Image (cartoon, rainbow, N blue to C red):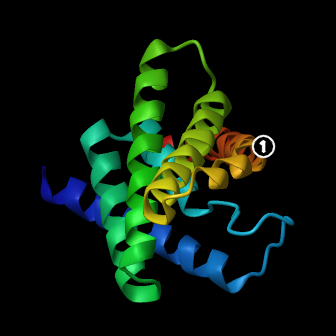
Amino acid sequence: MTTKNVAHCGILTALAMIFGYVEALIPFHFGIPGVKLGLPNIIVVLALYTLPVYQAFVIQVARIVLVSFLFGNLSMMLYSLAGGMLSLLVMVLLKKKMWLSIAGVSMAGGVSHNIGQLAVAVLVVQNLKIAFYLPALLTAGLVTGGLIGMLVYKVKPLIER
């Protein structure tokens, strides 16, 4: 990576962290415990479409680790890493197919993020009944992923200029 790329990744990581902090401050209540807008994912999806995949990966991991240490705990890091890595993997694979829009890829990322976190919750709690939460999480992932994807679709041309 060049110095310019490192600086670019650092700025995007810092911006994702700021979005995460702002999201923690603003009380969004969707009626489903633990569901958030996923504002930091705006930066991750944008990075996926404007940078090489490994840089989007670095931004995702750095953001999760730093936010967990600054504003959360190790448990939060475990859930976030599971959801974040699965989400990024799914988005990378679907982006390569070229038949889904940015919003479609982001929706798949939102859904897979929730599935990754739920899988970790099932392992930690050791109770499969928590899986009944899945329909609500899938719906939330579709809605928030779609909103994030539409926003990235609008912002991406501005960034590329």
Asked whether 12 or 114 is in front, the reply is 114
Left or right position of 2 against 130: left
Residue pictured at 70% horizontal, 63% vertical: 35
Relative to 66, does residue 143 appear above or below in the rendering?
Answer: above
Local packing at callout 1 (Cα closer than 10 Å; few below 14, some 14-19, many 20+) is some
Q: From this viewpoint, which residue is outermost toward the right?
A: 31
Q: Is residue 14 visible?
A: no
Asked whether 78 or 157 is in front, the reply is 78
Tell me where residue 146 sits by quadrant. Answer: top right
In what element is the residue under mark 1?
helix
Residue 47 location in percent, x, y? 42, 46
Q: Is residue 36 visible?
A: yes
Residue pictured at 65% horizontal, 75% vertical: 23
The residue beneath circle 1 is 139
Left or right position of 4 against 77: left
Residue 95 location in percent, x, y? 47, 24
Residue pictured at 31% horizontal, 48% vertical: 57
Relative to 111, does residue 136 appear above or below in the rendering?
Answer: below
Residue pictured at 61% horizontal, 44% vertical: 110
Asked whether 159 or 85 is in front, the reply is 85
**Amino acid type of the residue that numbered disc 1 sits on in the rendered structure:** Thr
Asked whether 157 or 72 is in front, the reply is 72
Left or right position of 42 against 11: right
